[in-house]
Amino acid sequence: MILDDKQTALAIKTLSEQDSTLAALINRVGECRLRGKDHPDLFGTLADAIVSQQLSGKAAATIFARFCVLLDADDKKPQPAQLASVTEEQLRSVGLSRAKALAVKDLASKIEQGLVLPLSVLETLPDEAVIQNLIQVRGIGRWTAEMFLMFQLGRADVLPLDDLGVRKGFMLTYGLDAMPDKKVLMQQAVSWQPYRSVASWYLWRATELR
């Protein structure tokens, strides 16, 4: 299921009816702004995700911009073929760590080989199949693939169990003394289906409330 305005409105209605605690959070936060991008750029999006790992938003944006300049991608949509003549040393010179330099090279290679499926194919696959296809790339783990599903493909029912923001938001919203383990979160999330992406988005917002 893909999130659009109609589905998002239905998600909020359904979640509010199924979970009174989450309903209170939804009322405090207001409109859900989670939407998938209409035409995500596969390589650029995933390369940006790799570059951004463990960095602040500002630092990540600066390094990704330098990465695009290095590849002559003025539109900030670098293509795999542009990495063919770029060395690891050049990638490191614009701010990528060795691990990230190797990861973006591996991503480009696997896309060109067809091991990472084209976007038009990924859009037709179930969530887990998309995850399994993407995590074969060096530097892309389950969390990165889940973010791709939520924010690029607009999938409605993704629950990123390893996300610290979701877990902290759950703790705050449900008045727990400690961060929940995966089992507790999964049990509560049964009532959120098929809109766990929207529930997760609201739990992220819970960490920003004062």
Image: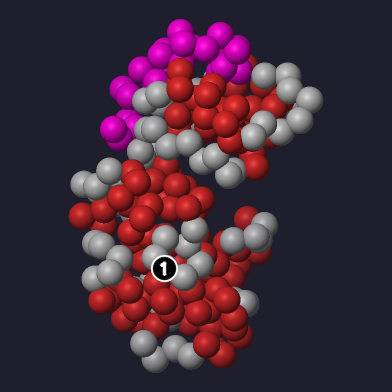
Q: Quadrant of residue 51?
A: bottom right
Q: Is residue 147 visible?
A: yes
Q: In screen coordinates, is 85 left or right of 33? A: left
Left or right: where 6 falls relative to 27: left
Crowding near the residue tagged with mark 1, few <14, some 14–19, many ≥20 C-alpha atoms within 10 Å: many
Determine whether 203 is above or below 135 in the image: above
Q: Which residues are magenta?
A: 1-27
Q: Which residue is mark 1?
A: 137
Q: Name the one closer to the observer, 103 or 3.
A: 103
The residue lying at 57 percent from left, 17 percent from top is 22
> Where is the N terminus found, in terms of image quarters?
top left
Whole-percent x and y of residue 12? 44, 18
Q: Residue at x 37, y 33 (%)?
A: 156
**The furthest residue to the right:** 177
What residue appears at the point 24 percent right and 71 percent down from the top-left corner?
Answer: 114
> What's the magenta bit mostly, secondary-structure-wise?
helix
